[in-house]
Image (spheres, rainbow, N blue to C red):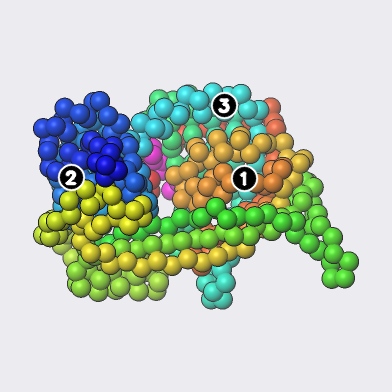
Amino acid sequence: MAENSESKKYPLHKCIFQGDVKTLSSLIRIYDIAEKDKQGNTPLHLAVMLGRKESVQLLLAHGAPVKVKNLAGWSPLAEAISYGDRQTISSLVRKLKQQAREQMEERRPNLVATLRQMGDFYMELRWDFQSWVPLVSRVLPSDICKIHKCGASIRMDTTLVDFNNMKWGRGDISFIFNGDQKHSESLTVLDNEAKLFQRVRYEETELDIEDEVDILMSSDIMAAQMSTKGITFSRAQTGWIFREDKREMVGPFHADFYQINGIVLASRKRREHLSEEDLQKNKAIMESLTKGNSQGFANGEPHVRRASLNPPPESNITWEEYITAPPGQCPLLGRSLVYKESSKSFKATVAMSPDFPLTVDMLLNVLEVIAPFKHYSKLRQFVLMKLPPGFPVKIDIPILPTVTAKITFQEFAFRHDIDPQLFQIPSDYFEDPMRFPDL
């Protein structure tokens, strides 16, 4: 009886499992398309894992969410890469980008209104990257980032173009967000040395999508996250004999220092979809990158699109067997996993100041605007944690498994004299839509 009631719970999942597209199309408007079953799988997860291509397209047409993880921590896109059908992967990548744009469009009016309500200000952030790997530490960059805010506009000046996968680029870069402009023209990056500008594109071309699919199909499926579940804060101590709580000035701000215990950076990889040739090629690419050659995937060879893989063996698991399996013990529905997991614990410190004029919520809104720079999205993720009272004027956080960043809010002032010209593209700058290909 219990089995029966369990199997009736998820009608969309059941239709997909049984390959019943006709019933699925009649029920899809009635039931929750984003519902998760006991394994954390949405109907889209199941359709992808079982190779039900028609169901995948039907679910996407009805707005099934793509950025959602099951209990094992994998998204439908990760499962699609494992299955290896190129058309399905392309459809999911396209839909994922569309849904991200729509979410940003929804949040944008509130974000712009919040910026307007905030006083105009000037702020300086210092980034110092450090590593416990001795040779790496010598070559890591530092940067002072200057942020001006006026009305609904923000300008960030930086010398660090980006920091990603142990590669960084230097330059004289300004990043401008104009809340008054229409969405497609609101984000611009200036290269002040070359006198070029690029509008940050929100829509990728078909060529961009297909290039991304090639990379996804030929690389490890990666999931990395900073786990903050077990985090505790304790007051940092100072003094050898007489121990006392550590308090220092950070710039002009009084600050209390805290140790953050229990940060875990977990990374997981899957590679069941890769051939021996892929593994050798990827190893060679990584070796060339570590020697400073950033040619990446091109390697001077003519580019050939990745073909779909042969599908994995048909699953002989029944719906009853699947739906009655205990949570976290999902029967194998696709390829046998080739899986590697690693985790590293970090100790970090944060200095909280009651004097800082900006609130954490205001900072989150500023960081949302500048999130296309990857290390800023890490900072935003950190600030979302339940921090002790005050404002985090100095933070040590892990950016990569071997690299931590020390971020210091060394200056802040509300100002009424910020020049609106700072948020305009200078008239002698030329547009180059490919100056920053990753944006």
Q: CA distance from mark 2 to mark 1?
A: 40 Å
Q: Amino acid at mark 2?
A: Phe
Q: Disc 3 to disc 1, how far (Cα)?
A: 22 Å
Q: Which residues are magenta?
A: 191-200
Q: Secondary structure at mark 3?
A: helix
* 9 or 270: nearer the viewer: 9
Place residue 183 in its image quadrant: top left
Residue 361 picture quarter: top right
Which circle, 2 or 1, is nearer the viewer? Answer: 2
> What secondary structure is marked by label 1?
loop
Q: Is residue 195 magenta?
A: yes
Front residue of this view, candidates 343 and 17:
17
Residue placed under numbered mark 2 in the picture: 17
Q: CA distance from mark 3 to mark 2?
A: 46 Å
Residue type at numbered disc 1: Lys
Vertical placement of residue 237 versus 102, above or below: below
Which sits in the foreground, 103 or 261?
Answer: 261
Q: What label sits on residue 114 in the rendered view?
A: 3
Q: Which quadrant of the figure contains the N terminus?
A: top left
Considering the image in quadrants, where does the C terminus appear? top left
The percent position of residue 307, horizontal first and vertical second, equals 12, 57
**What amino acid is labelled 3 in the image?**
Thr
Q: Which mark is residue 386?
A: 1
**Reading the chain from its start, which is encountered first: label 3 or label 1?**
3
Label 2: few (<14), some (14–19) or many (≥20) C-alpha neighbours in 10 Å: many
How many numbered marks have been drawn onto this rendered protein structure? 3
In front: label 3 or label 1: 1
Whether 429 is among the magenta residues is no
Identified at 63% across, 48% down, the residue is 125
